[in-house]
Image (cartoon, helix red, strand yellow):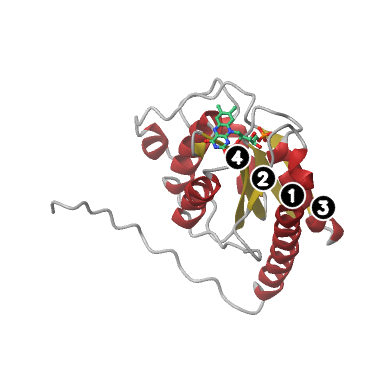
């Protein structure tokens, strides 16, 4: 089994990376491969809201000049997905947000590409804004009919300078427990697939508040 984790920080080996690594170590102990993709230092533009991914039905964003389409395929092939972001102004770091908007729009408008995969979010923060970012990341997972493992607190770890987060003892435990629960859940799901038939996907109903 394989997990792909996205580091949404501009820092390659910063606090988001260390939080992801701590989750990854537990997954790897259970024989699950983890690939960490560094998104936060790339040039990734935001969604054009052009609807091209929905019209073309080719599992691709029409913008072909960055890594988004490759990362969508990595998620499609993986059994589990980790979304990691530092807090920037109480929000997901900008590059990561651009990536997530486009990738999850492609996935949802092309048959629900991430449906029933295991997905979790992790956040690194200096002081304040961790929970809003955790919520924002989880919105992508919830929207996609993914299955979310939990920890013994919200998946937020504290630190400022790169790597400082490893001194947050409780934060590191949260990441370890998340990794253990994620590994267990992935194995349960894998074992259960032969026993329990997957339910059928319902076509999405789109309404708005005026009709
Ligand atoms: C542009 C920017 C905005 C930030 N905004 C916040 C914030 O709103 N709240 C906070 O507590 N920390 C904020 N920080 C600090 C980072 O969240 C913190 O240093 C985090 O650990 C960085 O993770 P990283 O090493 O993975 O980049 C901000 C940092 C930057 C660069």
Of residue 189 and residue 161, the one placed in the foreground of this image is 161
Q: Is residue 5 left or right of residue 207?
A: right
Percent coordinates x, y for residue 133 in the rendering? 51, 45
Mark 3 residue's CB less than 8 Å from ligand 1: no
Give the CA distance from mark 1 to mark 2.
6 Å
The answer to which of marks 4 and 3 sits earlier in the sequence is 3
- For the N terminus, the quadrant is bottom right
Percent coordinates x, y for residue 117 in the rendering? 60, 58
- Say if mark 1 contacts mark 2, CB within 8 Å: yes
The answer to which of marks 1 and 3 sits earlier in the sequence is 3
Mark 3, secondary structure of its residue: helix
The answer to which of marks 1 and 2 sits earlier in the sequence is 2
Near mark 2 (Cα within 10 A), the count class, few <14, some 14-19 or many ≥20, is many
Q: Which residue is mark 2?
A: 158
- Say if mark 4 contacts mark 3, CB within 8 Å: no
Mark 2, secondary structure of its residue: strand
Point out the residue furthest to the front here. 127
Residue 85: which disc? 4
- For the C terminus, the quadrant is bottom left
Give the CA distance from mark 4 to mark 3.
18 Å
Q: Which residue is mark 1?
A: 168
* Residue at x 67%, y 45% (from the top left corner): 158
- Say if mark 4 contacts mark 1, CB within 8 Å: no
The answer to which of marks 4 and 1 sits earlier in the sequence is 4
Mark 1, secondary structure of its residue: loop
Point out the residue furthest to the left here. 211
- Say if mark 1 contacts mark 3, CB within 8 Å: no
Residue 25: which disc? 3
Between marks 3 and 2 in the image, the one whose residue lies nearer the viewer: 2
Of residue 109 and residue 82, the one placed in the foreground of this image is 82
Give the CA distance from mark 2 to mark 4.
12 Å
Q: Quadrant of ligand 1?
A: top right
């Amino acid at each position: 089994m394989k997990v792909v984790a996205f580091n949404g920080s501009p820092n390659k080996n910063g606090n988001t990376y260390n939080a992801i690594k701590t989750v990854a170590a537990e997954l790897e102990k259970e024989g699950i491969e983890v690939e960490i993709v560094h998104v936060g230092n790339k040039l990734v533009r935001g969604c054009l809201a052009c609807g091209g991914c929905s019209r073309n039905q080719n599992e691709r964003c029409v913008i072909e000049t960055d890594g988004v389409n490759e990362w969508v395929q990595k998620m499609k092939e993986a059994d589990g997905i980790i979304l990691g972001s530092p807090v920037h102004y109480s929000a997901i770091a900008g590059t990561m947000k651009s990536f997530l908007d486009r990738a999850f729009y492609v996935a949802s408008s092309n048959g629900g590409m991430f449906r029933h995969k295991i997905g979790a979010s992790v956040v690194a923060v200096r002081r304040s804004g961790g929970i809003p970012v955790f919520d924002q990341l989880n919105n992508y997972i919830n929207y996609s009919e993914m299955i979310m493992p939990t920890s013994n607190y919200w998946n937020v770890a504290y630190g400022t300078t790169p790597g400082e987060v490893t001194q947050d003892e409780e934060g590191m435990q949260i990441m370890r427990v998340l990794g253990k629960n994620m590994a267990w859940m992935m194995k349960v799901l894998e074992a259960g697939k032969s026993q329990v038939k997957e339910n059928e996907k319902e076509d999405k109903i789109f309404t708005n508040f005026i009709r």
